[in-house]
Image (spheres, rainbow, N blue to C red):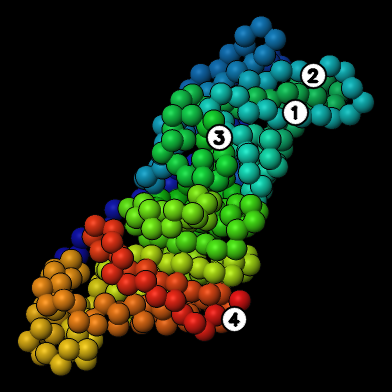
Amino acid sequence: MARRRRRLRPGFSTGSAAAAAAQGALRELLGLPCPERVQVSLPGGGCLNLPLLRHGRCGSQGEALVVKDAGNDPDVTHGAEIGARVRLLGPGSGETLILRGGEGVGRVTKPGLPVAVGEPAINPVPRRILHQDLATVWQMSGSGLPMRLEVEIFVRRGEEIARRTLNARLGILGGISILGTTGLVRPFSHQAYRATMVAGLKVARATGLTHGVFSTGGKSEEHLRKLLPHMREEGFVQMGDYVRFALKAAVSLGFTQLTVGAFLGKALKMAQGFGQTHASRGSINLRELGRWTEKQTRDPLLAQAVARANTAREALEILGAVGRPGVIEEVGRRMLAALRGHAGPSPRLVAVILDFDGHPLFWGRDPKGVA
């Protein structure tokens, strides 16, 4: 009998946590009953009931804390304590809500993000939900006056947590971002990864770059940085397994040159036409590499040895023992052709295949780009 796949538990975003904490803080400030769980609106409709870790009033401000729960998603903000402090503003002629970033909330220092430079890194959707939910609580007070509040969002240990994110590269310094386009965190979210990639590309373009360097992960990026020492940090973007998506997103944003670097295993999958290189979409076909080996060397025994290798690393060792006679170049040419198919005719393309110590096995340019 097939084993039933365990259902992964969703969580909630930092934006939802901030909205819940702000509601609790405002209730305390206004002297309203504050339940242990508060209702937070979801951008797409519906709501969540989120627990408050603690809440109370301290002098002229209300304060509350929520523990971020990312469900089964490997989110670095899981378990973070996200809080809000709410204060009343003086009388005025209309509704005002001043949103500030306290300790542990990053500040935007580079253009290209949906929040202006100098602002706390609290994205537009969480801002809207926070305002909407606070207005609902304000109406419950029955004061009849326009809502005039200063709201400070903070994250305990937020600056420490941010070191494990890409925030610094995006120009978000001093803490984490308050995010959440849906209010929810879905486990192993492909959407979240792609959104981070696009944000990185937008920052690079906003700083004037038209050349982007894609890597499949942190290690390959580290090697590419050494090989391209004059490239600015913003130009390096980790595409993970999303090859086709990354290239199309970069082209749509106006990049005119794209360099794609990978170790041999991922390069082989790209050369075989995979637009998504995750193992779930198919394994490396070393039999195909064996066929390319025979085409280049006319050596059926070498081709069989390559085809029977257990891993791309072993195949490279077999080829390395005989000087890799044109085989890696064949992989590189096919990789470039596949990248061209994903990117379309406009950008100039460069493909880099790395050995497992970070040295380039192949560095080739596709001359067909028209940009």
Q: Sequence-wise, which precedes: disc 3 or disc 2?
A: 2
Q: Residues within 10 Å of mark 2 (few under 14, many from 20)?
A: few
CA gap, disc 3 and disc 1: 21 Å
Residue holding disc 4? 370
CA gap, disc 3 and disc 2: 28 Å
Mark in front: 3 vs 1? 3
Query: In this view of the protein, can residue 2 be seen by the observer?
Result: yes
Residue holding disc 2? 89
Circle 1: residue type: Ile
Q: Seen in the image, is 208 located left or right of residue 334?
A: right
Circle 2: residue type: Leu
Q: Are marks 1 and 2 in contact (CB under 8 Å)?
A: yes
CA gap, disc 4 and disc 3: 37 Å
> The C terminus appears in which quarter of the rendering?
bottom right
CA gap, disc 1 and disc 4: 48 Å
Q: Residues within 10 Å of mark 4 (few under 14, many from 20)?
A: few
Residue holding disc 1? 98
Q: Sequence-wise, which precedes: disc 1 or disc 4?
A: 1
Describe the element under mark 3 as helix, strand or loop. strand
Residue holding disc 3? 173
* Residue beneath the point at 62% across and 11% down: 57
* Residue in the foreground of this view, choosing between 68 and 342: 342
Q: Sequence-wise, which precedes: disc 3 or disc 1?
A: 1
CA gap, disc 1 and disc 2: 9 Å
